Amino acid sequence: MNTDKSLRLAYVCMILNAVIIGFSFLFTKMALAQASPIDTLAFRFAASFGVMSIPVVFGWVKLNYRGKPIYKALLLAAMYPLGFFAFQAFGLQHATSAEGGILFAFTPVMTAALASIFLKETTTGLQKLSIFLSVFGVAFIFVMKGGGFELSSTLGILLLILSSLASAGYSVLARSLMKAYTPAEISYFMLGVGFVSFLVISLADHTSSGTVDVLLEPLSDGSFILSVLYLGIMSSLVTALTSNYALSKIEASRMSVFNNLATIVSIAAGAIFLGEDVTVYHLIGSLLIIAGVLGTNLLGRKKSAGTVKQPSSVDV
């Protein structure tokens, strides 16, 4: 695939990624009405790992981990999905969803900083301004909705910051690992670690509380199954593949800012399916987000780091 086509596909992947994540909030709410956050994560990653295992078992997708830096892949999985979801779940127990939304919007800033340090990625002044513009757009929406910060939720805010930092760390490390792994290899490894880890935690929790017999009860609800399938297949498997592919083609700082588009999608989804109001501040914030994403990716292209080469053998 030539460079222009691969770059266009990378941008399509990130837009698709944002759309999927934007709708995931609806399905997460549906799932959490039937199961705990940890149980939901266990079912979610069971679905994603199970579905991706089908083409792997039949040999349609070739994976090769021999001689590759597994410890780096484990570190990547520790950041995402383990660190990201763990910090987020416990953080939201002590903070509001609005605080979570605002803090997650700062992930592109953290990503740009880490990418500059560890990947030597450069961004122009206009690109930095565009990143902050996108962040401000998300923060503006949540603040106008009445989502301020409370000192009483300091622990939650700290955990949510760590969640955003884990997401940023994933983007940077995944970009680096694309020199050794294919997007499918990284994605399958991440999903496998997520499945095993969350299943063990869920079983340990139910064993200690003597409720192992109710672990599978949520599967009797059709809406829960639908939610888990969406979260597992679309919001875990597909987003892992699309984001890892995009990271093999474009800089981490440019890719990360696309995540803020999910806020726009979630607003639209809420309006269409839940009848939620769309106000002027939603529109203003959305325009700021779009302007920030476009500015980050269209300004300063000459300084682009380009596509990460994926050799058949590992360079370490």
Image (cartoon, rainbow, N blue to C red):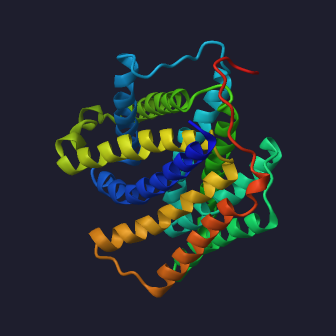
> Residue 198 location in percent, x, y?
45, 35
Which residue appears at 29% of the width and 32% of the height? 212
Which residue appears at 43% of the width and 31% of the height? 195
Counting every numbered tag in the picture gives: 0
Q: Nearer the viewer, residue 122 or 198?
A: 122
| Residue 169 is at least partly visible in this image | yes
> Residue 266 location in percent, x, y?
42, 65
| Relative vertical location of residue 135 with respect to residue 51 in this rendering, above or below | below
Which residue appears at 45% of the width and 53% of the height? 16
Left/right of residue 33 with respect to residue 107 in the rendered view: left
| Residue 151 is at least partly visible in this image | no
Q: Quadrant of the N terminus?
A: top right
> Residue 199 location in percent, x, y?
41, 31
Left/right of residue 229 with respect to residue 222 in the rendered view: right
Q: In which quarter of the image is residue 276?
A: bottom left
Q: Which of 63 and 211 is in front in this view?
A: 63
| Relative vertical location of residue 314 with respect to residue 263 in this rendering, above or below | above
Which residue appears at 30% of the width and 71% of the height? 272
